[in-house]
Amino acid sequence: MSRVISIHSYRGGTGKSNSTANLAALVAAQGNRVGIVDTDIQSPGIHVLFGFDDQKIERSLNDYLWGRCSIAEVAYDVTYAIGESAKPSSKIYLIPASVKAGEIARVLREGYDVGLLNEGFQDLIENLELDYLFIDTHPGLNEETLLSITISDVLLLILRPDSQDYQGTAVTVDVARKLEVPNLLMVVNKAPMVFDFDELKLRVEQTYGATVAGVLPHSDEMMVLASSGLFSVKYPDHSFTQVLRNIAAHLMA
């Protein structure tokens, strides 16, 4: 049975796409077949972590949503990004959203059939024989986000130790519980090193009544890398990567 994992945050700037890409890579490196769909159609970006720009993206999720091709035709094999840690059975596919201004403007102007997303997710799982499908969602709550939450086996919520994040995440948690998400996990990202991480983890768990899979520290190395690759591949022995591995283990449990 494949597992659908939605990575979500109430606000932008939480490191959602970076976390999605690295966690997907770590899961794939264990010998799994993994797909990543960038449904943040209004502000796509996860493709950059895999070395893509607008010149390399010949087809995108937008083409599928406009009926120009099947969603499997949009899947790019990016297994190379895992590096030497990949096993023979490891596979990772990326379904990027378009970064063309005209395509983004059309989404904002016309919208799209959200029901097609669910059909596309199932087609990807079947055609690519995926063990895991990661959905990088649009921040906040909209129709697409609600669909992703509804069909997810795991919802991973990312927040920063920030009052605005705390309040917005509370709304998302409440919605997720009403939609009866089977497994709700949380990740605190960009935590200042001066914080007591154990105390922070306990406080967040008590606030939301949900398991915190990991607390990721603010990392200068991550900032310097500037999305030019996967942190877990470039810094496999870093303490930040070890926390990512622990989170990945929660997702595979």
Image (spheres, helix red, strand yellow):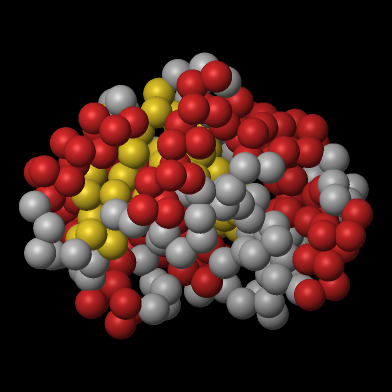
Above or below — where is 214 with respect to 207? below
Placement of 67 over or under 249, stated as above or below: below
Residue at 50% from the left image edge and 36% from the top image edge: 171
Q: Is residue 52 left or right of residue 167?
A: right
Instruction: Classify residue 81 by image quadrant.
Output: bottom left
* Residue 137 percent location from the top left of the image: 58, 48
- Which one is in front, 128 or 171? 171
Q: Residue placed at 38% from the left, 46% from the top?
A: 166
Towards the viewer: 88 or 234: 234
Seen in the picture, residue 191 relative to 128 is either above or below; the reply is: below
Query: Horizontal placement of 163 versus 242: left or right?
Result: right
**Residue 142 appears in the figure:** yes
Instruction: Locate residue 52 relative to residue 195 in the image: left or right.
Output: right
Where residue 14 appears, x then y in whole percent? 41, 59
> Is residue 132 visible to the viewer in this orientation of the structure?
no
Residue 188 placement, left or right of 11: left
Q: How many marks?
A: 0
Residue 232 rendering spot, x and y as whole percentages = 27, 61
The percent coordinates of residue 179 (x first, y second) are: 57, 20
Image vertical order of residue 251 relative to residue 14, above or below: above
